Image (cartoon, helix red, strand yellow):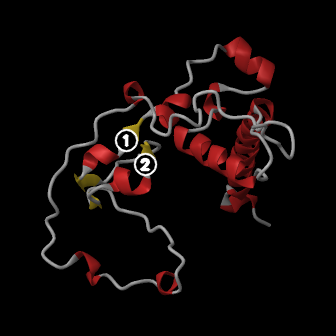
Amino acid sequence: ASMSSSGPPKKRHRGWSPGSPVPPPGLAVPVPTIRPSARTEPLLSVPVPQSMLTGILQPQPIPAGETVIVPENLLNNSGVRPVILIGYGTLPYFYGNVGDIVVSPLLVNCYKIPQLENKDLDLLGLTSSQLLSVENMILLTIQYLVQLGPDQIPLREEFEQIMLKAMQEFTLRERSLQMSAQCISVSPGQLP
């Protein structure tokens, strides 16, 4: 049987193929220490947001140290193994069927930049103090990926330009804050 296509073949990330829904185990790290919840009240005693009542689930931030229960048969029921990417901060504790999830450092490892030499920074018009934090780089990455259209492919060159622009804007803001602080410093003898 011949297969017809409505356009050019779709490009896929080279680390993923349709036949491998679960990431290779060599890329996973152990789940953080698991401890049972110390709560005495029921888990659902928290008021339910109105958005959940209308059928739209809004993810809520989970404070570090809280317990997240991984449901039984998550992998069998969903057909995929959720991957939690370590980005910034501390993960909650996972309890229950933790074998059905993968915790991966791949995201944060992408931003562990080797020290750039001063000549490289000079070529970019930057100094070492202008480099962005890992947290800010992750936020810029998410912002870039979210703004892409459904048929757009992320381009390294575009993303590098976004990072460079962010570093330069950071420097301009720092300089303007320093200059405004210097302008505000007026001694009483300087007043008319």
Say which of 81 and 84 sits in front.
81
Horizontally, residue 157 falls left or right of residue 68, namely right
Kindly identify the residue that appears in the image at 28 percent across and 41 percent down.
Answer: 31
Q: Residue 148, how many percent across, how many down?
A: 76, 50
In this view, 90 is above or below 58: above
Q: Identify the image quadrant of the C terminus.
A: bottom right
Q: Label 2: which residue?
A: 82
Q: Residue at x 64, y 13 (%)?
A: 117
> Which numbered disc flags the more N-terminal residue, 1 or 2?
2
**How far apart in space, not on screen, are marks 1 and 2 (Cα)?**
6 Å
Q: Nearer the viewer, residue 187 or 64?
A: 64
Dot 1 crowding, Cα within 10 Å, few <14, some 14–19, many 20+: many
Q: Horizontally, is 28 left or right of 156 in the view?
A: left
- Label 2: few (<14), some (14–19) or many (≥20) C-alpha neighbours in 10 Å: some
Q: Is residue 16 above or below residue 4?
A: above
Residue at mark 1: 102
Query: Seen in the image, is 137 located left or right of residue 175?
Result: left
Query: Dot 1: what SS?
Result: strand
Question: Nearest the camera: 70 or 160?
Answer: 70
In the image, residue 140 lies at what x, y percent? 66, 46
Query: Could you say which quadrant of the image residue 102 lies in?
Result: top left
- Residue at 62 percent across and 31 percent down: it is 129
Tell me whether the residue at label 1 lies in contact with that at label 2, contact meaning CB atoms closer than 8 angstroms.
yes
User: Which quarter of the image is occupied by the N terminus?
Assistant: top right
Residue extending furthest toward the right: 7
